[in-house]
Amino acid sequence: MNRLIIVLFLLFVISCEEISVVEQPINLGVESKVMVVNSAVVKDNVLQVSIATTPGAKYLLEVYTFGGKEPVKKLGFTADAEISNKSIQMDTLKKGMYDLKIINISGEEVKRPINHNNYL
């Protein structure tokens, strides 16, 4: 019994090594200075968005059902130019009205209605 206790104690001591955690900084990109929707059009079931952006800043595009609380589509990206052109497939969504929300890393957002009926 004493041997068992000694063996368990030794296993406990061996397994209790100090773990060093290396913290790596999270790259949040540069601060967004510009966030303007130049155009947002659904053509052939693809939402084509053109946004004035700050190169190096991070953005998130979200598509919501009109008045909805949860996004049905998301696209995150880091801007590599002053104008960012992005596409989101809409073929899996029903025809109708949607909200497009663009959010930068600071939490600022721009909201714009999207018509997925192809008649406006």
Image (tube, rainbow, N blue to C red):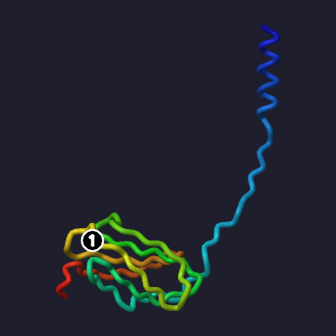
What residue is disc 1 on?
A: 91
* Quadrant of the snapshot with the N terminus: top right
* Quadrant of the snapshot with the C terminus: bottom left
Q: Secondary structure at mark 1?
A: loop
As drawn, which residue projects farthest toward the top? 1
Q: Amino acid at mark 1?
A: Asp
The residue sitting at 34% across, 64% down in the picture is: 70
92 vs 113: above or below? above
Q: Where residue 14 sits in the image (x, y, percent)?
A: 81, 31
The residue sitting at 82% across, 17% down in the picture is: 6
The residue sitting at 45% across, 76% down in the picture is: 103
Examine the image and state in which quarter residue 102 appears. Answer: bottom left
> In the drawing, does residue 64 fall left or right of residue 10?
left
Examine the image and state in which quarter residue 28 appears. Answer: bottom right
Residue situated in front as seen by the camera: 112 or 79: 79
Examine the image and state in which quarter residue 88 appears. Answer: bottom left
85 vs 107: above or below? below
